Amino acid sequence: MSRITDGPVKDGDSLSAASLNDRFASYTQTDLNAFNHRDAAHDLPQFDTGWLLTHAQTVQIGKPDWKHSSYVTVPGQVIMPALPHPVEDGAGTPTVMSFGAGLTISPGEVFRAYWNLSVFAGPGSNWNAAGSLGFMNFDNGSGGTRAASTWGAVWVTYLQWDVTDATLNNWVEVQGQSDFSTIIGAKYGSVMGSTEATAVVPADLRHADRPSQGTLPNASVQRSQRWRGVSGAWYFVPGATRTVYGLRVVIKGIMHPWNSGGLNYLVHDTAYSLDAFLRYNAGSLSVLKHRVQ
């Protein structure tokens, strides 16, 4: 930064509120230029990439209640193909980010989205029901079996955008993201390679103590997960100019890992979902758009 030099008060100078204020006028800059602003004023490693921020925006999503005395509940989805649940304010109104007349993302720019939500997963009682993917049977060492959770069951939160118009009535999954409705044999879900804008919430926390030499002598127990935070991120680099009118977070579940034909999937576990639920309160959705110089 340039140095400001101002002489001291001299004998005979009159002092008043106005004259004292005038002494600090030199420190008030109404513009930035090559003489009053230097690169040393910045944290240089953060600016060394040549990126310039051209747009930033954030919006609250979900139902605001930090005490969790009231919340929105999403029931487990059992009818396929299932529609996603848009994160809403508790009164049925989806909480979305609007870009008004549209936010243009051009080649040479990077669009970054971040979201978070306060959630509570209730696993219900069907985790070991017939057809559920969320459990495994072990020898109990006495001629019987014990059911234990795989810990693989999750709820998914992911991003949708509207790239049609400002009415925000044409939501589709963002690039690289599936809607988890692909038919995989007798199941519905998504290949893992198409979950670029997905963040998961564990659906249960069940364990059994003291397994011994491949046997499970003790019954598994369900532990309370309590409220937790879920957060996700997604980056988009366009190959051609794209105009985005809105962005939102949606929820589906319960899902479970699945392998078919050598490919890994997340598929709907409809049996496990029967009386499971996910509660949520408020969070945020934020975006940044960068331009590379």
Image (cartoon, helix red, strand yellow):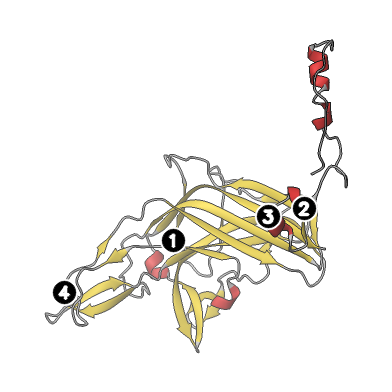
Amino acid type indicated by mark 3 = Val
- Mark 3 highlights which residue? 287
Q: Are marks 3 and 1 in contact (CB under 8 Å)?
A: no
Disc sitting over residue 166 in the figure: 2
- Mark 1 highlights which residue? 76
Confirm whether residue 7 shows in the render. Answer: yes
Q: Residues within 10 Å of mark 4 (few under 14, many from 20)?
A: some
Q: Is residue 140 left or right of residue 229?
A: left
Q: Is residue 27 above or below residue 192?
A: above
- On the image, the x and y values in percent for residue 70 come to 44, 41
Q: Is residue 24 left or right of residue 196?
A: right
**Foreground label between 4 and 2:** 4
Q: Are marks 1 and 2 in contact (CB under 8 Å)?
A: no
Q: CA distance from mark 2 to mark 3?
A: 18 Å
- On the image, the x and y values in percent for residue 25 come to 83, 26
Residue depicted at 60% across the width and 71% down the height: 178
Q: Residues within 10 Å of mark 2 (few under 14, many from 20)?
A: some
Nearest to the observer: residue 115 or residue 172:
115
Q: Is residue 207 left or right of residue 243?
A: left
Nearest to the observer: residue 233 or residue 62:
233
Task: Find residue 150 and report its image quarter.
Answer: bottom left
Q: CA distance from mark 4 to mark 1?
A: 31 Å
Q: Earlier in the sequence, mark 1 or mark 2?
A: 1
